[in-house]
Image (cartoon, rainbow, N blue to C red):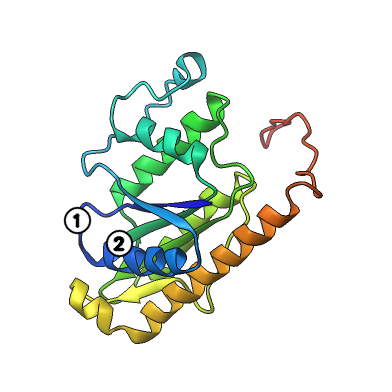
Amino acid sequence: MKVLLLNGSPKEKGCTYTALAEVAKTLNEEGIETEIFQAGKDTLPCRDCRACAKIGKCVINDKVNEFILKAKEADGFIFGSPVHYASASGVITSFLDRAFFASSLSGQNAFNNKPGAAIVSARRAGTTFALDQLNKYFMITQMPVISGRYWNMVHGNTPDEVKEDLEGMQNMRFLARNMAYYLKMKECAKDNVALPNQESVVYTNFIR
């Protein structure tokens, strides 16, 4: 079993990475393989060109397509972001918009029915809004959302300060153990419990 962790910070080894590394370390202790994937800091936003439906991948040639391929083989996900202007970073927002859109329209469905969790780091505030933003990717993709024992956030202006946030770092370990527990239960149930039956999706708008 493997969890793919996405670092949505433009800083490769900053505060967000510090929290993700604590999650990864605890997952490894629980027997779960991990990989921390660094999102490209120059990630372009989705063009809504829908070319992915025809060519089977995002038309923009960067790290998003590489991530989707890894996501197809992963069993669970942790998305991490710093708080920028009371929301998730522009890097992770553009990255996940394209990853989920291209995965869905191309028919790869790399994320469906796999557990996910979001973590955020901040100097002071904006964390709950950023978490809410990231959790929506799970909720529109039939992904079970894994929790910790508190909101999944750490505070600090530097990696060393994040390590001093004892409650926040402890919650990263709670989150990791809960993710491991869910994955192990899912593994035990896979031969006895089928995934939910799917219906053809109905698309409407608010005027019909």
User: Compared to 49, does 207 lie above or below?
Assistant: below
- Number of disc labels: 2
The reply, left or right, for residue 116 in relation to residue 51 is: right
Name the mark on residue 55. none
Q: Residues within 10 Å of mark 2 (few under 14, many from 20)?
A: many
Tags 1 and 2 in contact by the CB under 8 Å rule?
A: yes
Q: CA distance from mark 1 to mark 2?
A: 9 Å
What is the x, y in percent for residue 15? 25, 67
Q: Residue at x 54, y 26 (%)?
A: 105
Quadrant location, the C terminus? top right
What is the x, y in percent for residue 199? 79, 33
Note whether residue 129 is visible: no
Q: Residue at x 57, y 69 (%)?
A: 178
The reply, left or right, for residue 12 in relation to residue 83 is: left
Location of mark 1 (residue): 11
Task: Tell me which corner region of the image, top left, top right, bottom left or bottom right, holds residue 9.
Answer: bottom left
Q: Residue at x 20, y 72 (%)?
A: 159
Which three-letter amino acid code belongs to the residue tagged 1? Lys
Name the residue nearer the viewer: 35 or 77.
Answer: 35
Location of mark 2 (residue): 82
Which three-letter amino acid code belongs to the residue tagged 2? Pro
Name the residue nearer the viewer: 186 or 117.
Answer: 186
Q: Residue at x 55, y 64 (%)?
A: 180
Note whether residue 49 is visible: yes
What is the x, y in percent for residue 77? 48, 52
Task: Tell me which corner region of the image, top left, top right, bottom left or bottom right, holds residue 68.
Answer: top left
User: Compared to 98, does 33 lie above or below?
Assistant: below
Secondary structure under the numbered disc 2 in the rendered image:
strand
Earlier sequence position, callout 1 versus callout 2: 1
What is the x, y in percent for residue 62? 28, 30
Secondary structure under the numbered disc 1 in the rendered image:
loop
